[in-house]
Image: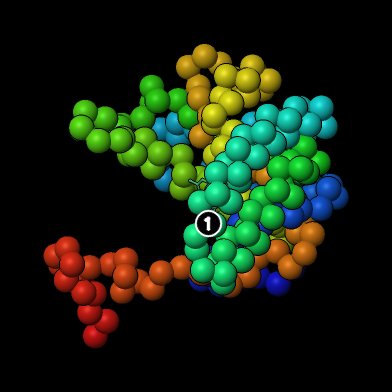
Amino acid sequence: MTELGLYDAMSSCRAVRRLRPDRVPDDVIERVLQAAAWAPTGGNQQPWRIVAVRDAGIKRALGDLYQPVWADYAAASRRGIAKLDEARRDGVERTLAAGDYLADHFGETPVVAVFCFSPRNMAITDAGLDRPSVVGGGSVYPAVQNLLLACRAEGLGCVLTTLLCIKEVEVKQLLEIPDDWFTCAAVPIGYPLLRGHGPLSRRPIEKLVYSDRWNQRWNQS
Ligand SMILES: Cc1cc2nc3c(=O)[nH]c(=O)nc-3n(C[C@H](O)[C@H](O)[C@H](O)COP(=O)(O)O)c2cc1C
């Protein structure tokens, strides 16, 4: 395998939802799991676990849970894009079509990495604020991103999904997750059916980064 540079991996690691059912070798899976384990967490507590699902029956059951949740989400999105101009509508429709494919084939994905977390071991420094708390996620999602990037480096397709959290009760029961652990992402992993990863569409840093003060444009010089 040719080594992919880190920046090349980051700038081409996009959501790949059309995956082949072909088996992924265990050593490859182990490398991407190891990449997840290298991620930083608050106080180095590593308050996350992955249930790496390869069992066909369990994957099918996860797919059965994912499908209707995706269908509701996709129907709402399709209603929402009706008023967009044609070019933007087409773009979103392409993404939704890929999402439909994933939902229909979720259970055939070679591996689904279900990320779980335990809030007990998290330093959630924004928990007391009068706004949605996000800091706890910072002790899990870097591990998810490491795994996505490692998949990219291995030529594997993958996508971070969170819709299954809506079915957390059922997922916990299915995967025998303890009462004090919860779910936060499910990443289907497999070799891409089509082109897989590629160029990203993202806002330029000038639109995302300010210099010293909010609304003060980032100065590149
Ligand atoms: C927090 C989060 C939740 C997401 N949940 C889902 C999901 O449930 N299903 C899905 O198909 N994609 C999901 N995605 C993938 C995003 O839709 C995707 O990363 C985004 O549209 C950018 O796509 P691109 O990387 O192909 O440009 C999620 C991504 C993030 C970061």
Q: Is residue 163 left or right of residue 56?
A: left
Instruction: State which quarter of the image contains the C terminus.
Output: bottom left
Judge by depth and name the residue closer to the eye, 151 or 160: 160
User: Of 40 and 210, which appears nearest the observer?
Assistant: 210
Up-down: is 170 above or below 204?
Answer: above
In the displayed structure, would residue 66 be above or below residue 206?
above
Q: Is 158 on the left-hand or right-hand side of 127? A: right
Residue at the front extreme of this rendering: 83
In this view of the protein, which residue sits in the foreground, 45 or 206? Answer: 206
The residue under the point 31% across, 31% down is 123
Q: Residue at x 50, y 25 (%)?
A: 182
Percent position of residue 70, x then y: 63, 40
> Pointer 1: residues within 10 angstroms few (<14), some, or many (20+)?
some
Vertical placement of residue 216 versus 96, above or below: below
Which residue, given by chain and number where applicable, does mark 1 sit on? 81
Q: Is residue 158 visible?
A: no
